């Protein structure tokens, strides 16, 4: 029996990956190298420091912990310039009607994001008040694929993982949901998210019943 849905933010509710990419690329260029959009895919769902470590590795650059903290801060300043210009028009298509549909059914809503900027983004796009529980990068000590972010979300609503459906666009996020015993719906492409209980391309025209039926049909097919 599903009582709540826990949503990832970046890539599920809004497309902030493009702003992360511009800001991280600017940092790489500042350090004298560049990276591709394909490499950028590997940063989805990954914490700020883990992302920086990957980028420095691609550039073959070594930095001290203090220098890394400064670089992460520099990137975050550039990133925040973009997110502070966001407005409700940046909510991905189908998301707002789907949240309304869940609310009508009495399904509780929570957010589970690795980002320390999650509250700023929710405020900008006007969705802050829709979530009963918000767990973000400032509340967690272990990043996805660790299930902590979703576990804290379920705990805040006094629910068990089995009563919550998680929506995620990142491989690490699906791993996190599965590790915590949640039902996991991948939002995006089957090739990265095939281990989820169901993969949907987006939320357009979606109902909770269609998702639950889809999960059941996939489980039967996969035995
Ligand atoms: C995740 C994004 O939601 O948050 C990652 O998918 C990002 O790309 C991570 O690195 C941390 O974000 P922030 O805003 O704390 O730097
Ligand atoms: Mg995401």
Image (spheres, rainbow, N blue to C red):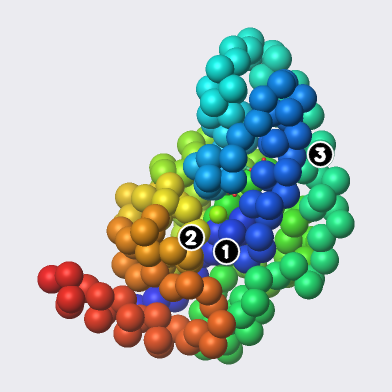
Q: Mark 1 points at which residue?
A: 12
Q: Respond yes or no on whether mark 2 lies under 8 Å from ligand 2.
A: yes
Q: Which residue is drawn at 37% across and 50% down?
A: 175
Q: In this view, does 202 lie above or below 86?
A: below
Instruction: Indicate left or right for 113 with 81 as reference.
Output: left
Instruction: Dividing the image into four quarters, tell me where ligand 2 lies.
Output: bottom right
Q: Which residue is drawn at 54% across and 77% down?
A: 203
Q: Is any part of residue 162 visible from this angle? A: no
Packing grade of label 1 (10 A; few <14, some 14-19, many >=20) is many
Q: Name the residue under label 2.
A: 168
Q: Is residue 156 above or below residue 67?
A: below
CA distance separating discs 3 and 1:
22 Å
Q: Which residue is drawn at 72% across and 21% down?
A: 31
Farthest residue toward the left?
223
Q: Mark 3 points at which residue?
A: 78
CA distance separating discs 2 and 1:
6 Å
x%, y% of residue 198?
35, 70
Which label's residue is closer to the chain start, 3 or 1?
1
Secondary structure beneath dot 1 equals loop
Q: Is any part of residue 33 visible from this angle? A: yes
Q: Respond yes or no on whether mark 1 lies under 8 Å from ligand 2.
A: yes
CA distance separating discs 2 and 3:
25 Å
Nearest the viewer among 71 and 177 is 71
Instruction: Indicate left or right for 108 with 67 as reference.
Output: left
Secondary structure beneath dot 3 equals helix
């Amino acid at each position: 029996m599903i009582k709540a849905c826990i949503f990832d933010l970046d890539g599920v509710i809004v497309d902030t990956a493009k702003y992360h990419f511009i800001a991280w690329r600017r940092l790489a260029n500042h350090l004298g190298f560049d990276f591709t959009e394909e490499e950028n895919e590997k940063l989805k769902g990954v914490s700020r420091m883990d992302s920086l470590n990957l980028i420095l590795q691609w550039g073959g650059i070594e930095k001290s912990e203090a220098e890394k903290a400064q670089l992460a801060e520099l990137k975050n300043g550039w990133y925040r310039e973009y997110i502070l210009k966001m407005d409700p028009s940046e909510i991905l298509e189908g998301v707002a009607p789907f949240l309304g549909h869940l609310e009508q059914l009495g399904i509780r809503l929570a957010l589970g994001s690795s980002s320390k900027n999650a509250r700023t983004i929710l405020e900008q796009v006007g969705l802050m008040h829709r979530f009963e529980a918000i767990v973000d990068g400032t509340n967690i000590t272990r990043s996805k694929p660790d299930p902590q972010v979703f576990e804290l979300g379920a705990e805040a609503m006094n629910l068990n993982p089995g009563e919550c459906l998680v929506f995620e666009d990142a491989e690490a996020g699906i791993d996190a949901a599965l590790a915590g015993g949640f039902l996991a719906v991948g939002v995006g492409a089957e090739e990265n998210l095939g281990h989820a209980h169901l993969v949907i391309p987006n939320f357009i025209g979606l109902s909770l019943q269609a998702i639950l039926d889809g999960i059941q049909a996939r489980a039967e097919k996969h035995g």
